[in-house]
Amino acid sequence: MTRASAPPHWSRRAVLVGAASLAACPRAVRAAPAARIVSLGGAVTEILYRIGAAERVVAVDTTSLYPAEALRDKPNVGYLRALSAEGLLSARPDLVIATEGAGPPDVLALVREAGIPVASVAEAPTEAGVLDRIVAVGRHAGLDDEAGRLAAEVRADFAALAVERGRITRPTRALVVLSLQNGRLLAGGRNSTADGILRLAGATNAAEGIEGFKPMGDEAVIAAAPEAVVMMRTGHGTATPEAVFAQPGLSQTPAARRHALVTLDGLLLLGFGPRTPQAARDLMRALHPDLSRG
């Protein structure tokens, strides 16, 4: 994995003066699309690669895990929500495309003050949200036609997913667990990416009683009665049913009795990029194995 060396600590004045020297030619109005793009957010990076802008991406953040060459070959400016103006400006971009939630906000404000446009892309965890994101990234990158073709491809995939989802006779009650640390369970409730992917997969969210990602105590988990548990597969290893269902709360659920644990790649599962129909289909078939035999 190629990582940029840590830049020296610069004062606010030094950052602005330095950036101004890099921006000697006007950038507010460009006759041509940006030639040097910093991409912030796994879905944004994936879209840029899919629409043919890979060569123009000069740096990415740590959530840009797909395709693998993005984080391997491009300088890494750090974690999406803990960025620094120095790191971003050291890539000498003429455009930053950032998923909603990137920051801190004052860092992006400083980048804008330095004369670098920062385009924010919404991240609604819905079918429409995915399609809007593709179109928005394409517009900011000056690749509207390419983004339109990708959006049409993804829209068709969503339509095929809906047909398959229509064959579900009884939705599975599932719980998306973001982490299990020191006996504390962090689950995805209403208005979260976890809730969004469950809906697309034709499942019922067992954590619908909480908002966003929140900890759930043992009693709440037992009361939620999930029939399946969904977790992210990470580079730190894949959770096993034995370890997951040894947790006190989860051990007393229908999911534990069925040993029903589904693990999927984290960015695929919750990234809401172009592969979202694939993620929902993989999850749906794992929860309803009979669908793949139909």
Image: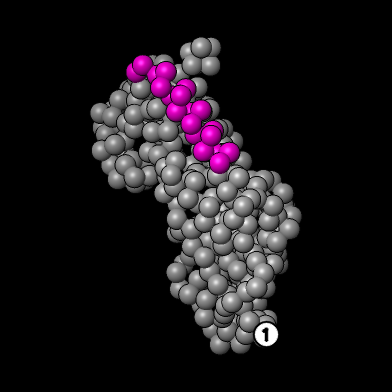
Q: Is residue 55 left or right of residue 222?
A: right
- SS class, disc 1: loop
- Position in image of residue 258 (x %, y %): 41, 16
Magenta region: which residues?
152-170
* Residue 82, placed above or below residue 175: below
Q: Is residue 212 left or right of residue 27?
A: left
Residue assigned mark 1: 24
What residue is rendered at 51% in x and 12% in y? Answer: 294
Q: Nearer the viewer, residue 270 or 78?
A: 270
What residue is rendered at 59% in x and 82% in y? Answer: 15
What residue is rendered at 70% in x and 61% in y? Answer: 56
Q: Is residue 176 left or right of residue 25?
A: left
Q: Is any part of residue 16 visible from this angle? A: yes
Magenta span: predominant SS is helix
* Residue 140, placed above or below residue 253: below
- Kind of residue sitting beneath label 1: Ala
* Residue 287, placed above or below residue 83: above
- Position in image of residue 143 (x %, y %): 63, 57
